[in-house]
Amino acid sequence: MNIVVTPVLALTPEDRARAGELLLTLLDDYERGLPTAPLVPEFDEEALTDLLSAPISREGIGVEGVFAEIKNKIIPNSTALASPRFLAYVSGPPNGIAPYAEAIAAAINQNCNFWQLGPAASVVERAVLRWLAELVGYPPDAGGILTGGGSIATLNALVTALNAFDPDFRANGLQARSAPAVVYTSTEAHRSVDKAAAILGIGLDHVRHIPVDEQHRMRVDALAEAIAADRRAGLAPFCVVATSGTVTTGSVDPLNAIADLCEREELWLHVDGAYGALFRLGTTTRDRLDGIERADSITLDPHKMLFASLEAGCLLVRDRKRLRDAFAFNSSYLTIAEHPVMVDFMDYGPQLSRGFKALKVWTALQAFGTDAFRAAVDQTLELAQHLAERVRRAEELELMAPVPLTAVCIRLRGATDTDHTEILAQLAREGTALLGPANVNGRMGIRACVTNYRTRREDIDLVVDRLCEFARSVESGRQGRSRQQLAGS
Protein backbone atom coordinates (compact mmCIF):
# COMPACT_ATOMS: atom_id res chain seq x y z
CA MET A 1 0.00 0.00 0.00
CA ASN A 2 1.42 3.35 -1.08
CA ILE A 3 1.01 6.16 1.41
CA VAL A 4 0.97 9.63 -0.17
CA VAL A 5 2.93 12.09 1.95
CA THR A 6 2.37 15.77 1.24
CA PRO A 7 5.68 17.68 1.23
CA VAL A 8 5.95 20.19 4.05
CA LEU A 9 5.44 23.29 1.84
CA ALA A 10 2.91 21.78 -0.58
CA LEU A 11 -0.86 21.90 -0.31
CA THR A 12 -2.93 18.79 0.14
CA PRO A 13 -5.37 17.99 -2.67
CA GLU A 14 -8.17 19.31 -0.47
CA ASP A 15 -6.31 22.57 0.26
CA ARG A 16 -5.53 23.04 -3.44
CA ALA A 17 -9.20 22.69 -4.29
CA ARG A 18 -10.21 25.11 -1.55
CA ALA A 19 -7.53 27.64 -2.53
CA GLY A 20 -8.79 27.53 -6.11
CA GLU A 21 -12.36 28.18 -4.99
CA LEU A 22 -11.34 31.05 -2.76
CA LEU A 23 -9.14 32.60 -5.42
CA LEU A 24 -11.84 32.51 -8.10
CA THR A 25 -14.36 33.99 -5.69
CA LEU A 26 -11.95 36.75 -4.70
CA LEU A 27 -11.16 37.64 -8.34
CA ASP A 28 -14.83 37.62 -9.29
CA ASP A 29 -15.85 39.76 -6.32
CA TYR A 30 -13.06 42.24 -7.07
CA GLU A 31 -14.07 42.55 -10.73
CA ARG A 32 -17.74 43.04 -9.89
CA GLY A 33 -16.95 45.60 -7.22
CA LEU A 34 -14.69 47.85 -9.30
CA PRO A 35 -17.38 50.30 -10.51
CA THR A 36 -18.27 51.23 -6.93
CA ALA A 37 -14.94 50.59 -5.18
CA PRO A 38 -13.33 53.59 -3.45
CA LEU A 39 -10.50 54.94 -5.58
CA VAL A 40 -8.24 55.64 -2.62
CA PRO A 41 -9.33 53.74 0.47
CA GLU A 42 -9.87 55.36 3.82
CA PHE A 43 -7.33 52.92 5.09
CA ASP A 44 -7.88 50.99 8.29
CA GLU A 45 -4.85 51.99 10.31
CA GLU A 46 -5.50 49.30 12.88
CA ALA A 47 -5.57 46.58 10.21
CA LEU A 48 -2.40 47.89 8.57
CA THR A 49 -0.63 48.18 11.91
CA ASP A 50 -1.59 44.58 12.59
CA LEU A 51 -0.14 43.52 9.22
CA LEU A 52 3.07 45.34 10.08
CA SER A 53 3.55 44.18 13.64
CA ALA A 54 1.80 40.82 14.00
CA PRO A 55 4.30 37.97 14.49
CA ILE A 56 4.38 35.14 11.96
CA SER A 57 2.60 32.11 13.38
CA ARG A 58 4.85 29.13 14.07
CA GLU A 59 2.12 26.74 12.95
CA GLY A 60 0.75 28.89 10.12
CA ILE A 61 -2.85 29.99 9.62
CA GLY A 62 -3.63 27.79 6.63
CA VAL A 63 -5.33 28.48 3.34
CA GLU A 64 -8.58 29.74 4.84
CA GLY A 65 -6.73 32.05 7.20
CA VAL A 66 -4.54 33.53 4.46
CA PHE A 67 -7.49 34.31 2.19
CA ALA A 68 -9.37 35.83 5.13
CA GLU A 69 -6.42 38.18 5.77
CA ILE A 70 -6.30 39.15 2.09
CA LYS A 71 -10.05 39.73 1.91
CA ASN A 72 -10.36 41.65 5.18
CA LYS A 73 -7.09 43.61 5.38
CA ILE A 74 -5.32 43.83 2.03
CA ILE A 75 -8.08 44.30 -0.56
CA PRO A 76 -9.96 47.01 1.43
CA ASN A 77 -6.70 48.92 1.94
CA SER A 78 -5.58 48.85 -1.69
CA THR A 79 -5.86 51.64 -4.27
CA ALA A 80 -8.28 50.74 -7.07
CA LEU A 81 -5.93 51.26 -10.02
CA ALA A 82 -8.39 49.40 -12.26
CA SER A 83 -11.27 51.77 -11.48
CA PRO A 84 -12.66 53.46 -14.62
CA ARG A 85 -11.99 56.88 -13.05
CA PHE A 86 -8.40 56.19 -12.05
CA LEU A 87 -6.87 58.81 -14.35
CA ALA A 88 -3.95 60.06 -12.28
CA TYR A 89 -0.96 58.43 -13.91
CA VAL A 90 0.09 56.49 -16.99
CA SER A 91 -1.08 53.28 -15.40
CA GLY A 92 -3.79 51.17 -16.93
CA PRO A 93 -5.75 48.31 -15.40
CA PRO A 94 -4.57 44.76 -16.08
CA ASN A 95 -6.34 42.93 -18.90
CA GLY A 96 -8.78 40.23 -17.88
CA ILE A 97 -6.56 37.20 -18.37
CA ALA A 98 -3.55 38.66 -16.52
CA PRO A 99 -4.30 37.12 -13.09
CA TYR A 100 -4.49 33.64 -14.61
CA ALA A 101 -1.27 34.09 -16.57
CA GLU A 102 0.46 35.31 -13.42
CA ALA A 103 -0.75 32.23 -11.53
CA ILE A 104 0.57 29.90 -14.23
CA ALA A 105 3.91 31.71 -14.35
CA ALA A 106 4.20 31.33 -10.57
CA ALA A 107 3.30 27.64 -10.75
CA ILE A 108 5.87 26.66 -13.37
CA ASN A 109 8.40 29.20 -11.99
CA GLN A 110 10.70 29.34 -14.99
CA ASN A 111 14.03 31.10 -14.47
CA CYS A 112 14.46 33.12 -17.64
CA ASN A 113 18.21 33.49 -17.60
CA PHE A 114 19.68 30.70 -19.75
CA TRP A 115 17.42 28.65 -21.95
CA GLN A 116 17.91 25.29 -20.27
CA LEU A 117 15.98 26.55 -17.23
CA GLY A 118 13.00 27.53 -19.38
CA PRO A 119 13.05 26.50 -23.04
CA ALA A 120 9.45 27.49 -23.74
CA ALA A 121 9.85 30.69 -21.70
CA SER A 122 12.85 31.68 -23.80
CA VAL A 123 10.88 31.20 -27.00
CA VAL A 124 7.80 33.03 -25.67
CA GLU A 125 9.91 36.05 -24.70
CA ARG A 126 11.54 36.01 -28.13
CA ALA A 127 8.09 35.90 -29.75
CA VAL A 128 6.85 38.87 -27.69
CA LEU A 129 10.00 40.87 -28.46
CA ARG A 130 9.73 40.06 -32.17
CA TRP A 131 6.15 41.34 -32.27
CA LEU A 132 7.05 44.52 -30.38
CA ALA A 133 10.04 45.11 -32.66
CA GLU A 134 7.84 44.71 -35.74
CA LEU A 135 5.31 47.14 -34.23
CA VAL A 136 7.90 49.91 -33.89
CA GLY A 137 9.37 49.17 -37.33
CA TYR A 138 12.61 47.48 -36.30
CA PRO A 139 14.42 45.04 -38.61
CA PRO A 140 14.45 41.24 -38.05
CA ASP A 141 17.91 41.29 -36.42
CA ALA A 142 16.72 43.59 -33.61
CA GLY A 143 16.93 42.34 -30.05
CA GLY A 144 15.63 43.20 -26.63
CA ILE A 145 14.64 42.08 -23.19
CA LEU A 146 11.63 42.45 -20.91
CA THR A 147 12.36 44.47 -17.78
CA GLY A 148 10.68 45.56 -14.58
CA GLY A 149 9.66 48.87 -16.16
CA GLY A 150 10.68 51.85 -18.24
CA SER A 151 13.21 53.20 -15.75
CA ILE A 152 15.23 49.98 -15.79
CA ALA A 153 14.94 49.81 -19.59
CA THR A 154 16.34 53.34 -19.91
CA LEU A 155 19.18 52.51 -17.52
CA ASN A 156 20.04 49.43 -19.61
CA ALA A 157 19.86 51.53 -22.78
CA LEU A 158 22.42 54.00 -21.46
CA VAL A 159 24.72 51.10 -20.50
CA THR A 160 24.41 49.80 -24.06
CA ALA A 161 25.04 53.28 -25.49
CA LEU A 162 28.17 53.74 -23.38
CA ASN A 163 29.56 50.40 -24.53
CA ALA A 164 28.86 51.27 -28.16
CA PHE A 165 30.44 54.70 -27.71
CA ASP A 166 33.60 53.53 -25.93
CA PRO A 167 35.04 50.07 -26.72
CA ASP A 168 37.04 50.26 -23.46
CA PHE A 169 34.06 51.17 -21.29
CA ARG A 170 33.63 47.65 -19.92
CA ALA A 171 37.27 47.47 -18.84
CA ASN A 172 37.84 51.03 -17.68
CA GLY A 173 34.38 52.47 -17.04
CA LEU A 174 34.18 56.22 -16.86
CA GLN A 175 37.20 56.42 -14.56
CA ALA A 176 39.80 56.45 -17.30
CA ARG A 177 38.09 58.96 -19.56
CA SER A 178 39.75 62.35 -19.93
CA ALA A 179 36.67 63.79 -21.65
CA PRO A 180 33.47 63.40 -19.61
CA ALA A 181 30.59 61.72 -21.47
CA VAL A 182 27.45 63.83 -21.96
CA VAL A 183 23.83 62.78 -22.50
CA TYR A 184 21.06 65.04 -23.87
CA THR A 185 17.34 65.01 -23.21
CA SER A 186 14.54 67.56 -22.96
CA THR A 187 13.26 69.59 -20.04
CA GLU A 188 10.08 67.48 -20.29
CA ALA A 189 11.88 64.13 -20.05
CA HIS A 190 11.10 61.52 -17.42
CA ARG A 191 13.25 61.59 -14.29
CA SER A 192 14.54 58.11 -15.15
CA VAL A 193 17.10 59.72 -17.49
CA ASP A 194 18.62 61.74 -14.65
CA LYS A 195 18.42 58.75 -12.35
CA ALA A 196 20.23 56.50 -14.84
CA ALA A 197 22.95 59.11 -15.32
CA ALA A 198 23.45 59.35 -11.56
CA ILE A 199 23.56 55.56 -11.10
CA LEU A 200 26.02 55.03 -13.95
CA GLY A 201 28.39 57.73 -12.76
CA ILE A 202 27.79 60.01 -15.74
CA GLY A 203 26.72 62.63 -13.23
CA LEU A 204 23.83 65.07 -13.33
CA ASP A 205 26.24 67.84 -14.35
CA HIS A 206 26.67 65.98 -17.63
CA VAL A 207 22.96 65.68 -18.46
CA ARG A 208 21.80 68.50 -20.73
CA HIS A 209 18.09 69.37 -20.49
CA ILE A 210 17.24 70.89 -23.84
CA PRO A 211 14.42 73.49 -23.99
CA VAL A 212 11.16 72.65 -25.73
CA ASP A 213 8.94 74.44 -28.25
CA GLU A 214 5.36 75.63 -27.79
CA GLN A 215 4.16 72.03 -28.22
CA HIS A 216 6.54 70.84 -25.47
CA ARG A 217 8.81 69.00 -27.94
CA MET A 218 12.60 69.07 -27.79
CA ARG A 219 14.01 71.91 -29.88
CA VAL A 220 16.43 70.40 -32.40
CA ASP A 221 18.19 73.73 -32.95
CA ALA A 222 18.91 74.03 -29.22
CA LEU A 223 20.07 70.41 -29.14
CA ALA A 224 22.52 71.03 -31.98
CA GLU A 225 23.86 74.15 -30.22
CA ALA A 226 24.36 72.26 -26.95
CA ILE A 227 26.24 69.43 -28.67
CA ALA A 228 28.49 71.90 -30.50
CA ALA A 229 29.20 73.83 -27.30
CA ASP A 230 30.15 70.66 -25.43
CA ARG A 231 32.46 69.54 -28.22
CA ARG A 232 34.19 72.94 -28.15
CA ALA A 233 34.60 72.55 -24.39
CA GLY A 234 36.38 69.23 -24.84
CA LEU A 235 33.51 67.08 -23.61
CA ALA A 236 32.28 63.87 -25.25
CA PRO A 237 28.62 63.80 -26.34
CA PHE A 238 27.48 60.19 -26.72
CA CYS A 239 23.68 59.85 -26.45
CA VAL A 240 20.43 61.70 -27.01
CA VAL A 241 17.30 60.54 -25.18
CA ALA A 242 14.22 61.68 -27.08
CA THR A 243 10.72 61.13 -25.75
CA SER A 244 7.60 59.79 -27.41
CA GLY A 245 4.93 60.62 -24.89
CA THR A 246 6.19 62.96 -22.17
CA VAL A 247 4.75 62.36 -18.74
CA THR A 248 2.98 65.70 -18.30
CA THR A 249 1.56 66.56 -21.73
CA GLY A 250 2.14 63.43 -23.83
CA SER A 251 4.21 65.36 -26.36
CA VAL A 252 6.28 63.51 -28.97
CA ASP A 253 9.70 64.90 -29.82
CA PRO A 254 10.49 65.45 -33.56
CA LEU A 255 12.04 62.01 -33.93
CA ASN A 256 13.12 62.20 -37.57
CA ALA A 257 14.88 65.54 -37.13
CA ILE A 258 16.62 64.29 -33.99
CA ALA A 259 17.61 61.06 -35.77
CA ASP A 260 19.12 63.12 -38.62
CA LEU A 261 21.18 65.12 -36.12
CA CYS A 262 22.32 61.98 -34.27
CA GLU A 263 23.46 60.41 -37.53
CA ARG A 264 25.49 63.51 -38.42
CA GLU A 265 27.02 63.72 -34.95
CA GLU A 266 27.46 59.93 -34.59
CA LEU A 267 25.45 59.83 -31.36
CA TRP A 268 23.35 56.99 -29.97
CA LEU A 269 19.63 57.80 -30.14
CA HIS A 270 17.44 56.32 -27.44
CA VAL A 271 13.69 56.94 -27.46
CA ASP A 272 11.87 56.82 -24.15
CA GLY A 273 8.54 55.47 -25.34
CA ALA A 274 7.47 54.00 -22.00
CA TYR A 275 4.20 55.92 -22.33
CA GLY A 276 3.90 56.63 -26.03
CA ALA A 277 5.62 53.99 -28.16
CA LEU A 278 2.70 51.58 -28.04
CA PHE A 279 0.47 54.22 -29.60
CA ARG A 280 1.89 52.79 -32.81
CA LEU A 281 -1.18 50.58 -32.38
CA GLY A 282 -3.49 53.59 -32.60
CA THR A 283 -5.38 54.22 -35.81
CA THR A 284 -4.80 57.99 -35.57
CA THR A 285 -1.41 58.07 -33.86
CA ARG A 286 0.78 55.62 -35.78
CA ASP A 287 2.16 58.31 -38.12
CA ARG A 288 2.72 60.65 -35.17
CA LEU A 289 5.54 58.33 -34.11
CA ASP A 290 7.33 58.31 -37.47
CA GLY A 291 11.07 58.15 -36.93
CA ILE A 292 10.95 55.92 -33.86
CA GLU A 293 12.18 53.06 -36.05
CA ARG A 294 15.44 55.01 -36.60
CA ALA A 295 16.37 54.96 -32.92
CA ASP A 296 19.23 52.76 -31.74
CA SER A 297 17.13 51.72 -28.76
CA ILE A 298 13.58 52.16 -27.48
CA THR A 299 11.93 51.89 -24.08
CA LEU A 300 8.30 50.79 -24.03
CA ASP A 301 6.00 49.44 -21.33
CA PRO A 302 3.57 46.57 -21.94
CA HIS A 303 2.19 47.26 -18.45
CA LYS A 304 0.86 50.54 -19.82
CA MET A 305 -0.89 50.38 -23.19
CA LEU A 306 -0.87 46.57 -23.48
CA PHE A 307 -2.50 46.49 -20.04
CA ALA A 308 -0.23 43.77 -18.66
CA SER A 309 -0.14 43.46 -14.90
CA LEU A 310 2.85 45.01 -13.15
CA GLU A 311 5.70 44.59 -13.90
CA ALA A 312 6.33 44.44 -17.64
CA GLY A 313 8.70 46.92 -19.23
CA CYS A 314 10.82 46.41 -22.33
CA LEU A 315 14.04 47.54 -23.97
CA LEU A 316 14.39 47.09 -27.73
CA VAL A 317 17.74 47.57 -29.48
CA ARG A 318 18.01 47.89 -33.25
CA ASP A 319 21.22 45.81 -33.36
CA ARG A 320 20.89 42.96 -30.88
CA LYS A 321 24.68 42.45 -30.93
CA ARG A 322 25.10 45.83 -29.22
CA LEU A 323 22.93 44.65 -26.33
CA ARG A 324 24.86 41.42 -25.97
CA ASP A 325 28.19 43.24 -26.12
CA ALA A 326 27.08 45.31 -23.13
CA PHE A 327 25.79 42.54 -20.89
CA ALA A 328 27.26 39.12 -21.80
CA PHE A 329 29.83 37.61 -19.45
CA ASN A 330 31.36 34.12 -19.57
CA SER A 331 30.83 31.84 -16.59
CA SER A 332 31.96 28.23 -16.70
CA TYR A 333 29.19 27.13 -14.34
CA LEU A 334 26.50 28.65 -16.61
CA THR A 335 27.85 27.44 -19.95
CA ILE A 336 25.44 25.38 -22.02
CA ALA A 337 25.17 24.56 -25.70
CA GLU A 338 23.76 27.28 -27.93
CA HIS A 339 20.49 26.59 -29.71
CA PRO A 340 19.17 28.38 -32.81
CA VAL A 341 15.67 28.78 -31.35
CA MET A 342 16.64 29.81 -27.82
CA VAL A 343 18.16 32.94 -26.29
CA ASP A 344 20.11 33.20 -23.04
CA PHE A 345 18.55 36.39 -21.72
CA MET A 346 21.18 36.64 -18.98
CA ASP A 347 23.40 37.95 -21.81
CA TYR A 348 21.00 40.78 -22.69
CA GLY A 349 20.53 42.50 -19.33
CA PRO A 350 21.98 42.84 -15.82
CA GLN A 351 19.86 40.16 -14.15
CA LEU A 352 20.65 36.48 -13.81
CA SER A 353 17.52 35.22 -12.07
CA ARG A 354 14.49 36.53 -13.99
CA GLY A 355 10.79 35.75 -13.76
CA PHE A 356 8.59 34.73 -16.68
CA LYS A 357 7.22 38.23 -17.46
CA ALA A 358 6.66 37.39 -21.10
CA LEU A 359 3.89 34.90 -20.36
CA LYS A 360 1.34 37.53 -19.31
CA VAL A 361 2.06 39.64 -22.40
CA TRP A 362 1.97 36.65 -24.77
CA THR A 363 -1.17 35.22 -23.12
CA ALA A 364 -3.09 38.47 -23.51
CA LEU A 365 -2.09 38.90 -27.15
CA GLN A 366 -3.11 35.32 -27.87
CA ALA A 367 -6.39 35.52 -25.93
CA PHE A 368 -7.68 38.85 -27.24
CA GLY A 369 -5.77 39.40 -30.50
CA THR A 370 -4.13 42.59 -31.67
CA ASP A 371 -7.39 44.08 -32.97
CA ALA A 372 -8.75 44.20 -29.42
CA PHE A 373 -5.70 46.07 -28.19
CA ARG A 374 -5.92 48.48 -31.11
CA ALA A 375 -9.56 49.12 -30.23
CA ALA A 376 -8.65 49.73 -26.58
CA VAL A 377 -5.91 52.18 -27.54
CA ASP A 378 -8.23 53.97 -29.98
CA GLN A 379 -10.84 54.24 -27.25
CA THR A 380 -8.44 55.96 -24.87
CA LEU A 381 -7.44 58.40 -27.62
CA GLU A 382 -11.07 59.19 -28.46
CA LEU A 383 -11.92 59.77 -24.79
CA ALA A 384 -8.92 62.06 -24.33
CA GLN A 385 -10.07 64.16 -27.30
CA HIS A 386 -13.61 64.20 -25.88
CA LEU A 387 -12.21 65.44 -22.56
CA ALA A 388 -10.12 68.10 -24.30
CA GLU A 389 -13.09 69.30 -26.33
CA ARG A 390 -15.31 69.54 -23.27
CA VAL A 391 -12.61 71.58 -21.51
CA ARG A 392 -12.32 73.91 -24.54
CA ARG A 393 -16.08 74.50 -24.48
CA ALA A 394 -16.31 75.09 -20.74
CA GLU A 395 -15.88 78.77 -19.88
CA GLU A 396 -14.80 77.79 -16.35
CA LEU A 397 -11.86 75.69 -17.58
CA GLU A 398 -8.68 76.13 -19.60
CA LEU A 399 -6.83 73.54 -21.68
CA MET A 400 -3.19 74.09 -20.77
CA ALA A 401 -1.45 72.18 -23.60
CA PRO A 402 -2.13 70.32 -26.85
CA VAL A 403 -3.30 66.70 -26.50
CA PRO A 404 -1.26 64.57 -28.92
CA LEU A 405 -1.89 61.33 -26.99
CA THR A 406 -4.08 60.85 -23.90
CA ALA A 407 -2.68 63.26 -21.27
CA VAL A 408 -4.99 66.25 -20.74
CA CYS A 409 -3.83 69.20 -18.61
CA ILE A 410 -6.57 71.43 -17.21
CA ARG A 411 -6.61 74.63 -15.20
CA LEU A 412 -9.63 76.08 -13.43
CA ARG A 413 -9.94 79.75 -14.33
CA GLY A 414 -9.53 81.98 -11.33
CA ALA A 415 -8.24 79.17 -9.10
CA THR A 416 -4.98 79.41 -7.22
CA ASP A 417 -2.31 76.70 -7.01
CA THR A 418 -3.61 75.87 -3.53
CA ASP A 419 -7.15 75.60 -4.91
CA HIS A 420 -5.97 73.04 -7.48
CA THR A 421 -4.27 70.95 -4.82
CA GLU A 422 -7.37 71.01 -2.62
CA ILE A 423 -9.62 70.11 -5.56
CA LEU A 424 -7.48 67.07 -6.39
CA ALA A 425 -7.80 65.89 -2.79
CA GLN A 426 -11.55 66.49 -2.74
CA LEU A 427 -12.11 64.60 -6.02
CA ALA A 428 -10.35 61.58 -4.55
CA ARG A 429 -12.00 61.91 -1.15
CA GLU A 430 -15.52 62.01 -2.57
CA GLY A 431 -14.80 59.16 -4.99
CA THR A 432 -15.34 61.14 -8.19
CA ALA A 433 -11.91 60.45 -9.71
CA LEU A 434 -8.22 60.22 -8.97
CA LEU A 435 -6.43 62.83 -11.06
CA GLY A 436 -2.88 64.16 -10.80
CA PRO A 437 -1.15 67.54 -10.60
CA ALA A 438 0.37 69.19 -13.66
CA ASN A 439 2.98 71.92 -14.02
CA VAL A 440 2.89 73.38 -17.52
CA ASN A 441 5.19 76.32 -18.24
CA GLY A 442 5.39 77.06 -14.53
CA ARG A 443 1.61 77.10 -14.07
CA MET A 444 -0.11 74.56 -11.84
CA GLY A 445 -3.10 72.60 -13.03
CA ILE A 446 -4.77 69.21 -13.04
CA ARG A 447 -3.86 66.31 -15.28
CA ALA A 448 -6.07 63.45 -16.43
CA CYS A 449 -4.37 60.66 -18.34
CA VAL A 450 -6.75 58.30 -20.10
CA THR A 451 -4.89 54.99 -20.18
CA ASN A 452 -7.75 52.87 -18.92
CA TYR A 453 -9.80 50.59 -21.17
CA ARG A 454 -12.61 50.58 -18.57
CA THR A 455 -13.17 54.35 -18.80
CA ARG A 456 -16.34 55.52 -20.58
CA ARG A 457 -17.69 58.85 -21.81
CA GLU A 458 -19.93 59.17 -18.77
CA ASP A 459 -16.85 58.96 -16.54
CA ILE A 460 -15.20 61.80 -18.46
CA ASP A 461 -18.38 63.89 -18.36
CA LEU A 462 -18.72 63.37 -14.60
CA VAL A 463 -15.16 64.63 -14.07
CA VAL A 464 -15.63 67.72 -16.27
CA ASP A 465 -18.97 68.58 -14.69
CA ARG A 466 -17.45 68.34 -11.23
CA LEU A 467 -14.45 70.50 -12.20
CA CYS A 468 -16.84 73.15 -13.53
CA GLU A 469 -18.72 73.08 -10.22
CA PHE A 470 -15.46 73.56 -8.35
CA ALA A 471 -14.50 76.47 -10.61
CA ARG A 472 -17.84 78.18 -10.00
CA SER A 473 -17.46 77.63 -6.27
CA VAL A 474 -13.96 79.13 -6.31
CA GLU A 475 -15.21 82.16 -8.26
CA SER A 476 -18.18 82.58 -5.92
CA GLY A 477 -15.89 82.45 -2.89
CA ARG A 478 -13.52 84.99 -4.46
CA GLN A 479 -16.36 87.40 -5.18
CA GLY A 480 -17.69 86.97 -1.65
CA ARG A 481 -14.30 87.82 -0.16
CA SER A 482 -14.06 90.88 -2.42
CA ARG A 483 -17.45 92.14 -1.24
CA GLN A 484 -16.43 91.66 2.41
CA GLN A 485 -13.21 93.60 1.81
CA LEU A 486 -15.14 96.41 0.13
CA ALA A 487 -17.65 96.51 2.99
CA GLY A 488 -14.85 96.62 5.54
CA SER A 489 -13.20 99.55 3.80
Image: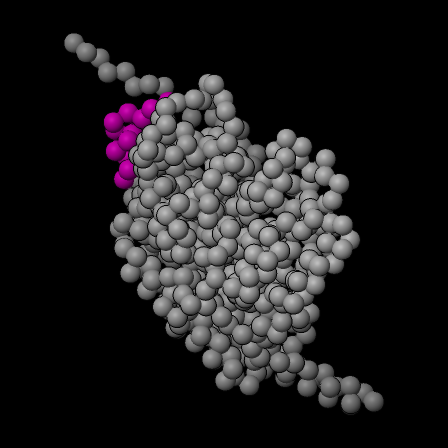
In the orientation shown, which residue stands out farthest toward the left? Answer: 1
Q: Nearer the viewer, residue 203 or 322?
A: 322
Q: Nearer the viewer, residue 67 or 234?
A: 234
Q: Quadrant of residue 99?
A: top left
Q: Position of residue 166 (x, y in %)?
A: 62, 40
Q: Is residue 79 visible?
A: no
**How is the structure coloured here?**
one colour
Q: Is residue 177 visible?
A: yes
Q: Is residue 50 left or right of residue 173?
A: left
Q: Is residue 295 magenta?
A: no
In the orientation shown, which residue stands out farthest toward the front? Answer: 264
* Residue at x-position 46% and y-position 32%: 346
Point out the image quarter for the C terminus: bottom right
Magenta part, dominant SS:
helix
Q: Nearer the viewer, residue 211 or 360?
A: 211
Q: Which residues are magenta?
A: 9-21
Q: Position of residue 487 (x, y in %)?
A: 78, 90
Point out the image quarter for the N terminus: top left
* Residue at x-position 50% and y-position 41%: 322
